[in-house]
Image: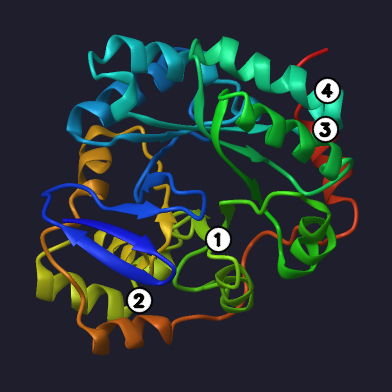
Amino acid sequence: MIFLQHAGKYTIQEHSTMKNILLNDGNAIPAIGFGVYMIPNDGSTYNAVKEALRVGYRHIDTAAAYFNEAEVGKAIQDSGIPREEIFVTSKLWLQDYGYEAARRGIDASLKKLNLDFIDLYLLHQPYGDVPGAWKALEEAQKEGKLKSIGVSNMTPNLWKKFVPQFATKPSINQVEYNPFFQQRELRALLAEDNVTLEAWYPLGHGDEKLLAHPLVTSLAEKYHKNAGQIILRFEIQEGVVILPKSATPSRIAGNIDIFDFALTEEEMEQMRGLDTGKGVHDPEAPGVGEMLLEKYKVHD
């Protein structure tokens, strides 16, 4: 089924493999995407993206700091799938923050991806000259280089610090999210402007405590699914965009095979009860921005 979500409501269309969510700018985003974080640019990303597209994914999520935009672009071009059917996300790195640097960074992503436009472009981290970089994204959106624009790793405090300075509301905030860390405060804040939450680490980065939780395994047995599929289905029904990652063909295919069943409202409430309110990454921790800037250099 395709679910078109807008302002907290769903319009449902029949489809076997995908659900789309309507963003606050009017564009639709596939609710499940294929993430390529930490997949090497030695041909592995190209092969993984080709396989993901083959089994039905139509949303690919990369970033300048993943160092694999070029392989993503080549896989898209070699897939034989029309460009307009594939939703591509990339992200601006901290090295290119500030207005002028961000404009160059956007063009660099377009060149590496070998695309005329990017469907969604995010500020990857909330540090440095965020307002200047955001202005560049807004202008690139008006120019047609970017269809939708958003942010990533913004906590409620960071959101309140930066977003009031923006002329345009972000359409997406991509953050850590899984059943153990359900971002309740942030989701309430984003809902005020119909901003969609997008999840990295939707499976808790393979957290065995999550995957082996008795509630998850009992639901997996009931629905004849694996634990990961139960978790991803819960997140989809919560209206979250999810980005499971794998380079293993069977897992790539399995992660998208979640549209032939639905959890009941009682089961959804039980899953909501797994929330601990704690994640593995704290964007507000002292020195995080400096550490990330030093660790990842996207150009000399």
Looking at the image, do the residues carrying marks 2 and 1 touch, with CB atoms under 8 Å apart? no
Q: Label 4 amino acid?
A: Ala
Who comes first in sequence, dot 1 or dot 4?
A: 4
Q: CA distance from mark 3 to mark 2?
A: 41 Å
For residue 183, side relative to residue 72 (left or right): right
- Residue 254, relative to residue 226: is it above or below? above
Who comes first in sequence, dot 2 or dot 4?
A: 4
- Residue 100, relative to residue 42: is it above or below? below
Residue 11: x and y, percent?
25, 63
Secondary structure beneath label 3: loop
Which residue sits at x=53%, y=65%? Answer: 194
- Return the residue at label 2: 213
- Return the residue at label 1: 195
Q: Label 3 amino acid?
A: Tyr
Secondary structure beneath label 2: loop
Who comes first in sequence, dot 3 or dot 2?
A: 3
For residue 82, side relative to residue 292 (left or right): left
- Residue 298, relative to residue 210: is it above or below? above
Callout in the foreground (3, 2): 3
Looking at the image, do the residues carrying marks 3 and 4 touch, with CB atoms under 8 Å apart? yes
Q: Residues within 10 Å of mark 4 (few under 14, many from 20)?
A: some
Secondary structure beneath label 4: helix
- Return the residue at label 3: 97
Q: CA distance from mark 3 to mark 1?
A: 22 Å
Which label is found at residue 101? 4
Q: CA distance from mark 2 to mark 1?
A: 30 Å
